[in-house]
Image: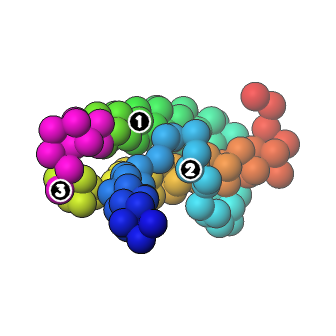
Amino acid sequence: MRLLLIFFMLILCACTSAKRSYEIQAVRVPVAPYLKMTCAELLSEQKLVLTELEAAGASVDKKYDSEKTKEIVGWIIFFPALFMFDGNEAEASQLAAKKGQLDAITEALSINKCNQ
């Protein structure tokens, strides 16, 4: 029984902590800097951030797929390698910041009553 418990603990510890892009929540960004912008500037900034957001989301998903592939291969071929996962925290934090920035721009567009 004790051996079975140790085995399950090893399984839980060896799994990757990587997340998919849709699982990542936005980090709140202050709207104040965007309130000073004109509607045209806000729309331009929104397009730029949307492009960066798509790239960051693709990066997060790519890293997630890579981690999951390593995990499967590790379980099949070499179990101790499963303890060397680094996850996708760096990519996830960048994506969360971009999501927050987009939310702030959208809020500024609404406050400034810009027609989209």
Of badges 3 and 1, the one in the foreground is 3
Q: CA distance from mark 2 to mark 3?
A: 29 Å
Disc 3 marks which residue? 80
Q: Nearer the viewer, residue 97 or 109?
A: 97
Describe residue 47's horizontal placement relative to residue 39 as left or right: left
| Number of residues whose C-alpha sits closer than 10 Å to that of mark 2, classed few (under 14), some (14–19) or many (20 or more) | some
Instruction: Give the x, y percent position of residue 65.
Output: 35, 34
Q: Earlier in the sequence, mark 2 or mark 3?
A: 2
Is residue 22 among what the camera can see?
A: yes
Amino acid type of the residue that numbered disc 1 sits on in the rendered structure: Asp
Describe residue 60's horizontal placement relative to residue 84 as left or right: right
Q: Which residues, given as a range, are shown in magenta? A: 71-80
Q: CA distance from mark 1 to mark 2?
A: 11 Å
Amino acid type of the residue that numbered disc 3 sits on in the rendered structure: Pro
Residue 61 part of the magenta-drawn span = no
Q: Earlier in the sequence, mark 3 or mark 1?
A: 1
Instruction: Give the x, y percent position of residue 114.
Output: 79, 38
Is residue 37 among what the camera can see?
A: no
Q: In the image, what residue occupies the spot 67% across and 54% down? A: 104
Instruction: Give the x, y percent position of residue 41.
Output: 59, 42
Disc 2 marks which residue? 24
The vertical placement of 76 against 100, above or below, is: above
Identify the secondary structure beneath mark 3.
helix
Amino acid type of the residue that numbered disc 2 sits on in the rendered structure: Ile
Q: Which residue is outermost to the bottom?
A: 2
Describe residue 7's horizontal placement relative to residue 39 as left or right: left
Q: Nearer the viewer, residue 60 or 96?
A: 60
Disc 1 marks which residue? 61
Q: In the image, what residue occupies the spot 56% across and 50% down? A: 24
The vertical placement of 36 against 24, above or below, is: below
